[in-house]
Amino acid sequence: MGKLVYETHCKVCHGENAEGTLDTLADFPKYVYPPLAGDDSFNDGAGLHRIITAAEFIKYNMPFGVDYKNPILTDEEAYDVAAYINSLPRPEKKHKERDFPDKKLKPVSTPYGPWTDTFPALQHKYGPFQPIIAYYEQNHKIKKTK
């Protein structure tokens, strides 16, 4: 479903393979629309590599020109396209294990460990997130939304 949403709403700006659109009139290489995959895209430690964060951004800001008061995509479409985009190749952030010194405060949708729970990496990346959220609330008294 995410690929279909991408092809329908995103590829016109971000490209067939999410490679972005370069400004051909610029004196130096720069993007008019940023790549969502590949070497020039955001790395796997970026906030947009977290599905919940990406879906919220996409829902209220995309496709280009959308008004946050009148989004075009449904919650499900935004989630699906965020999952699709984040399944594409991208640069790897070095030393991700140093992120979030207090692992209990790490967002539930952070797709890389270590975590203080035993949920699998794929669940941290793609969900379902509710069991993870419930775990932190029950075991650490921390209410997480992302």
Image: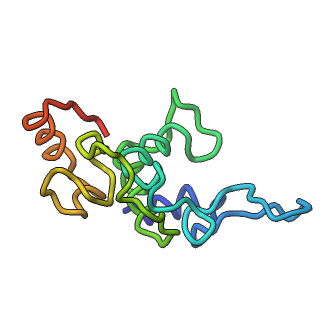
Coordinates of residue 21 in the picture (x, y in percent): 71, 63
Coordinates of residue 87 in the picture (x, y in percent): 40, 67
Instruction: Residue at 51%, 61% (x, y): give it.
Output: 43
Relative to 75, residue 24 above or below? below
Relative to 79, residue 7 above or below? below
Q: Which of the colour schemes (rainbow, by chain, secondary structure, one colour) is used?
A: rainbow
- Judged left or right of residue 127, residue 2 is right
Coordinates of residue 9 in the picture (x, y in percent): 55, 55
Relative to 110, residue 90 above or below? below
In the image, 106 versus 133, the foreground residue is 106
The image quadrant that residue 134 belongs to is top left
Instruction: Residue at 28%, 35% (x, y): give it.
Output: 145
Instruction: Residue at 52%, 69% (x, y): give it.
Output: 91
The image quadrant that residue 121 belongs to is bottom left
- Judged left or right of residue 3, residue 112 is left
In the image, 38 versus 56, the foreground residue is 38
Q: Quadrant of the C terminus?
A: top left
- Judged left or right of residue 4, residue 29 is right
